[in-house]
Amino acid sequence: MGKAASKEPLLKRTLNGLLNSEYLYSGLGLLLIMIVSCFLSKSFLSANNLLTILRQASILLMLSCGLTAVVLTGNIDLSVGGNAALTGCLCAQMLLLGIPIWIAIVISLVAGVFIGVLNGVLVGMLRLPPFVATYGTNMVATGLATIVMNGGVIYGLPANFTTIGTGYLGPVPIPIILSAITVAAFYVLLQRTTFGRNIYMIGYNPMAARYSSINTLGMLIAVFGLCGLTGAMGGVMLTARLNAAEAAMSETYGLQIVAAVVMGGTSLLGGEGSIGGTVIGAIVLTVIVNIMNLVGVKSDWQNLAVGAVIILMVWIDVYTRSKRAKRVTA
Amino acid sequence: MNIIRKKAQSVPPALYMILLLVVVYGLLVNNYFVPKNFANILSQAAPLLVLACGQTLIVMLQGTELSLGSAMSVVTVLWIVLLNSGIPMIPSILITIIAAGLIGLLNGVLVAYGGLPIFIVTLGMQNILKSIALLLSDSSSVYYEHPIFRTVAKGTVLGLPLAVWLSFLCFGITWVLLRKTRFGTHVITLGGNPESLTLSGGSIRRSTICAFIYAGLMAGVAGFLLCCRIESGNPNSGNGFEFNSVAAVLLGGTSMREGRGGVGGTIFGVLLIQILKSGLNQVGISSIYQNAIIGTFVLSAIIFDAFLKRRVEA
C-alpha cells in the first residue's frame, strides 16, 4: 500500500477489491439465484414480493446474528428455534395479561439471555459437546413453551406491539431496521473490538486461546448469551409479525438459522467467517424458500432443500480448507 | 472411601437413577411392581433399545447420529406404502431393510470420504429424511391390515412380547459384534485412537462406513418394531428418538471423548429413559408437560454424568 497503489484507477481498485472479497462466491451465488428466480416466476420481482423477502430475511438474520458469533468460536447452538418460541410465547402471554409492552419485551429478552447463558455454562464449564447440550436445551425450551401456552395458540396482540413486525418507519419496514442495527452492532463487535478478536482466536486455535490471557469460559458464556439475546429478539419480532404465538414457532425457522450462517461462509470448525456472510446467507436462503413458495413446491421439499444445502456448504468449506492446507504444506 | 468411589464410577450412573425412579413411581402408582407393568415398559422400550444399539457404535466414533429417528419414520412409512402397493410381505421387508442400510451407507460415505463432521451430515440427513417420510406418506398416516403387526407387538413368548425378544436379539448381536469381532475392535480403536487403526492394518474409511451401515440397519429394525406397535406408517413417529438414543448411550457410560464403553451400559440408559416416560403416563401427568420433563431429566442426567467424569479427570 502506498503512493503507487493510490495512483491506480478507482475502477480497477474496486474491481480488485470485489474479486478478492470473501463475499465473492456467496455474492455471485445470490445473484445467480435471483436471476434464475426471475425466470421461474413472474411475480418474483414485484415490489410486494421483494418486500416480503426482506421482511422474512430480516427475522432470520436477527436469529442468525448471535449464532454467527457462536459458530465463530467453533461451537454450535441448535436451541435458537426453541429459544425464539419460548420467548415469543412468554411475551404473548404477558401481553395478554396486560403487562406493558416494554416490560414484556424486556422480560422475554432476559429469558432468552438466560437460556443462552445456560448453554454457555453447559458447553464451557461442563464441557458437554455443544450439539448435545443445545439439542437438549432446544427440547427443554420447546417443552417449556408448550407449557406456557398450555398447548394452545394465542391470536390477536395489541397493535402497538405487532407494529414491531409489521410496521414501517418511513418507507422502511421496522424489522429491517432492527436487524440492520443488530448487524451493524455485530460487525463492530466482531471486527473492531478485542472481544471480537478473541472470538476468532478461540475458534481458530482453542488450545492457544486457553493458554493465552483470554478468559475462554467467560467468552463462551458471553457468546452463547449473545446468541440467546438475538434469539429472543428474533422470537419477539416473529410473534409481532405473526400476531400470534405457539410452541411450534420453534420449527418456523428451525434449521434455516444454521443454514444461513453456514451459507454465509462461516466455517463450523471455527475461526473463519463474518457477519456480512450471514447477511448474504440469510437473504439467499429466504430467496430460495420464497421462490419455492411462488412456484408451488410443497413445504416438505423445502426442508429437504435446506438439509441438502447445509451438507453441500459444509462440504465446500471442508474441501477448500483441505486444499488450502495442502497448498501450505506442499 | 476411594475404593467405594472407584466402584461407584464404574457402575453406569443410569443404574442409580433407575433405582430412584422405581422407588418414586412405586410409591406414586398403584400396582407398579407387577410383571405386566415391566413387560409393558420393555415392550415400549424395544424400538429405542434397538436404535440405541446402532447409536452406540456412532457415539464410540465420537459422533452422534441425528438422522436415526427420521430414518425410523421413513421405514414405517415405506413399509406400509410398499405393502399397500401390493408387494408381498417378505420382499417389502427386504426392500425396506436395504433402504435403511443405504441411508446408513450414504451417511457413512459423506463422513468418511467428505470429511464432514458427523453431526452436520446427520443433521442435514435428518431434514432430508423427514421430508422424504412426509412426501411418501402424503403428510398423513398410512395404514395396512396384517396380522403380523399384532403378533410382533403383542404376541408373547414366555410372557414377553416378540418385539422385546427381537430387541434383546439385536442387543446381543451388537454386544457380540463389539466385543468379539474384528470389526468391533476396529470401531472401538477408531473412536479412541484413529492412527493406531491404520497402523494395525484396518481402514478408517471402511470401518466408519460399516459402522454407519450398521446403525442404519438397526434403525430399520427399530422402524419395523415401531410400525408393529402403532400399526401404521407415521412420518412423525420417529421424531425425538435420536435424542433419546444418544442420551441412552451417554447415560449408559459410553464416552464420546475416548471411545470407551459399550452396549452393556446402553441398555441401562434405555431402561432409564423408558421407565421415566412410562411412569409419567401412569402418574397422570398430561402430555403437555411430558416433553419438558423428559428433556430436563435427560439433560440433567447427562450433566450429572459429565460432572462425575470431570471429577475423575481432575
Image (tube, coloured by chain):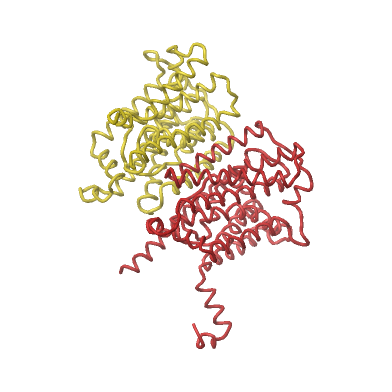
Is B278 situated above or below A263? above
Left or right of residue A234, residue A328 in this image? left
Q: Where's residue A52, x and y in %?
A: 70, 55
Left or right of residue B72, residue A169 in this image? right
- Number of numbered tags placed on the structure image: 0
Q: Quadrant of the C terminus of chain B?
A: top left
Viewer-nearest residue: A1 or B9: B9
Q: Inspect this view and state whether residue B97 appears.
A: no
Q: Which chain is yellow?
A: B
Q: Quadrant of residue A182?
A: bottom right
The outermost residue toward the front is B1
Left or right of residue B59, residue B29 in this image? right
Residue sitting at 51 percent across and 88 percent down? A3
Q: Quadrant of residue A322?
A: bottom left
Viewer-nearest residue: B67 or A141: A141
Colour assignment, chain A: red
Viewer-nearest residue: B167 or B23: B23
Q: Where's residue B78, x and y in %?
A: 48, 35
